[in-house]
Image (spheres, rainbow, N blue to C red):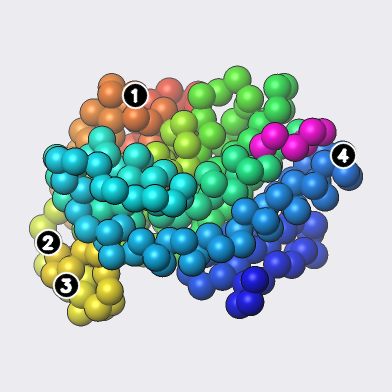
Amino acid sequence: MAGAVIAALPDGRLHLQEGPIDLVIGLDGTRAAMAEAARRAAATFEGLLAGLAAELPLLRQPVGVDPPPLRGPVAQRMAAAVWPFRRGFVTPMAAVAGAVADEVCEAIAGTPGLLSAHVNNGGDIALFLAPGQALRVGLVRSLRETAPEGLVRLTAADPVRGVATSGWPGRSFSLGIADAVTVLAATAAAADAAATIIGNAVDAEHPAIRRAPAESLDPDSDLGGRLVTTDVGPLPATAIAAALDAGEAVAEGLLQRGLIQAALLSLQEGLRVVGDPALLPGCG
């Protein structure tokens, strides 16, 4: 597994990294269960990036009327997650981080004696919770922040096993201007795709917003010549409200379709919560 990093962090979490994939895995259970889960995670991680790279040209293509003929399990997860959004422009890359997290989490979920696990791939998180277990997930109002400003408590009884956050300051390009859109969904891939779609919808036109063609920032971007947000200066309350209104409408539609469980949308001083407030109470 040349080029990959497999290491235990000082706090006991497992770190798996290769290329752009950067996983931090937290495990709870018996000592034997955590050791076995770590072994399964590392085994699943082996060859994962190479498998994605082999299908990268197809993964960067917009999803059309027919499902893309992808072969790898992670690639297929990506395509399934974005399939509900195929009427607009979307590529399977919109769900790559979440799909990777799901793949590794599923591999360790059946470990006997494991109580809970979270697989965090740069903020897109897949969860495993044995009956009676719970986990707290940190929330941020901007992807520029490193420390959580609030917490959401998820239990094994909740229909949520994926959390993802998207926004223009993040590591992936966004067509919108949201500081952060956090989505709770059945899987991390579903949350990742939905957060991307909602984040793109949080948008407005204002001189304080700067954009550039995605391909001018990254020649390999799946977004090509589409304008992505590079900076957002202070906005008036009317622009913030209009942008959040647009994103909220999209999020409400996804909630009604059963594609998400809840969403938190943040733009400067504005904040919107979609879904059950008890599930995602907000932050700050």
Marks 1/3 in contact by CB < 8 Å: the verdict is: no
Inspect the image, locate mark 3, and give the three-letter code of the amino acid beneath it: Pro
In 3D space, how far apart are the residues under numbered discs 4 and 2 (Cα atoms)? 54 Å
Q: Nearer the viewer, residue 177 or 107?
A: 107
> Could you tell which of marks 3 and 2 lies nearer the N-terminus?
2
Inspect the image, locate mark 2, and give the three-letter code of the amino acid beneath it: His
Q: Tag 4, which secondary structure?
A: loop
Q: Badge 4 is on which residue?
A: 30
> Could you tell which of marks 3 and 4 lies nearer the N-terminus?
4
* Residue 248 drawn at (x, y percent): 25, 36
> Could you tell which of marks 1 and 3 lies nearer the N-terminus?
3
Tell me, for residue 213, which label it has, or none.
Answer: 3
Inspect the image, locate mark 1, and give the three-letter code of the amino acid beneath it: Gly
Inspect the image, locate mark 4, and give the three-letter code of the amino acid beneath it: Thr
Q: Residues within 10 Å of mark 4 (few under 14, many from 20)?
A: few
Q: Which range is magenta?
A: 109-114
Q: Nearer the viewer, mark 4 or mark 2?
A: 4
Q: Nearer the viewer, residue 168 or 242?
A: 168
In 3D space, how far apart are the residues under numbered discs 3 and 4 (Cα atoms)? 50 Å
Q: Nearer the viewer, mark 1 or mark 2?
A: 1
Q: Is residue 26 left or right of residue 20?
A: right
Instruction: Specify whether residue 257 is in view.
Output: yes
Q: Residues within 10 Å of mark 3 (few under 14, many from 20)?
A: some
In 3D space, how far apart are the residues under numbered discs 1 and 2 (Cα atoms)? 33 Å
Name the residue rendered at 75%, 52% in the picture: 38
Determine the image quadrant of residue 206.
bottom left
Name the residue rendered at 68%, 63% in the picture: 15
In 3D space, how far apart are the residues under numbered discs 1 and 4 (Cα atoms)? 35 Å
Q: Badge 1 is on which residue?
A: 258
Q: Nearer the viewer, residue 184 or 273?
A: 184
Name the residue rendered at 47%, 37% in the picture: 187
